[in-house]
Amino acid sequence: MQEDPCAIEIKYGQGAKPGDGGLLMWYKVNRLIAAIRGVPAGVSLPSPPTHQTKYSIEEAVAKMIQSMAMAWGFRVPVYPKISATSTTLAVLNNLTRNPYAGGLAIDGEDGGTGAAYNVSMDHMGHPIASNVRDAYLNLVKVGKQNEIPIFAGGGVGKNGNLAANAAALIMLGASGVQTGKYLMQAAAGCLGSERDRCNICNIGLCPKGITSQDPRLYRRLDPEKVAERLVDVFKGFDTELKKIVAPLGRSTSLPIGMSDAIGIADGHAAERLKIKYVV
């Protein structure tokens, strides 16, 4: 609270667990984590879902934005992060009437976490592309597409094509993208990928020490080297994204909502997203 941040994001949900909370398994709750959480070591720690005193997610978002905006003297944009679900448009419509809303971050079904239930990761949430598209077209209907920015996340760059994914989501209506797992894989030295996954992130035995609390493992992680690689990743991403959007005449701005510049070889997906069908 010593100085104003660029923005404040309030997380209400992730794509992998929309509305049902999470679970930190007992074997990850070692003495250090237990001391931080103020619980005995070796017990499972469930994270509660939306608090039952809240009437709805729309009310919760409105109250939190108002409270945080007031706390920062209405100088800082405040926006919520929610899971991509059928309630997205309800939250968005509420934001269009809130003069203090700084935008909306949406996390698609591929938004992963080590504390989600398997049933949530496998069967819940909406694809980020269709959810962002619906949100943007809804803003167009009410003439607010230039006032409420949308930030898309959840599996962006999961196959290594970060710039291409970002460009596609921007053309579908996103003002920006959020990515997490790709940066872990590209910058932190993760040994996994979508096609050849290490798959032990959630049991505390990460061989690179990224998702481990065991000092014998996390000492293998060099934060300085990670920071250097992270800078390289963002520089490479910036260059590649410019190469994609420059032919559209957008070398100095993003083609937000420029859906006529994108097509897909799936007729049903093209109809759903209201973009060109390319044979």
Image (tube, rainbow, N blue to C red):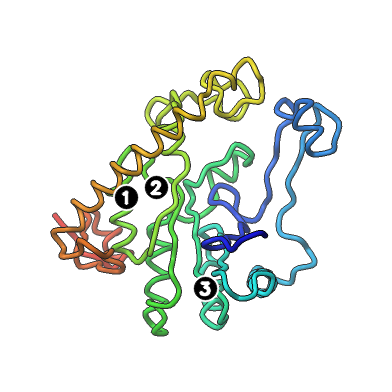
Which x, y percent locates residue 40?
Answer: 86, 31
- Please indicate whether residue 115 sits to the left or right of residue 15 in the image: right
Tell me if 81 is positioned left or right of 141 in this view: right
The front one of 123 and 180 is 180
Mark 2 or 3, nearer chain start: 3
Q: CA distance from mark 1 to mark 3?
A: 23 Å
Q: Residue at x 52, y 67 (%)?
A: 88
Residue at position x 63%, y 72% in the image: 69
- Nearer-N-terminus badge (1/3): 3
Q: Position of residue 82 (x, y in %)?
A: 56, 60
The image quarter containing residue 146 is: bottom left
Amino acid found under the numbered disc labelled 2: Val
- 227 vs 150: above or below: above
Residue holding disc 2: 156
Give the residue pinned by disc 3. Answer: 92
Spot occupied by residue 109 in the image (x, y as percentages of width and height): 49, 50
- Measured in 3D between alpha carbons, the distance from the residue under mark 2 to the one under mark 3, in whole angstroms, is 21 Å
Residue 235 drawn at (x, y percent): 31, 43
The answer to whether mark 1 and mark 2 are in CB contact below 8 A is yes
Q: Which residue is mark 1?
A: 165
Q: What is the crowding at mark 3: few (fewer than 14 residues within 10 Å), some, or many (at least 20)? A: many
Q: Secondary structure at mark 1?
A: helix
> Which badge, 1 or 2, comes first in the chain's sequence?
2
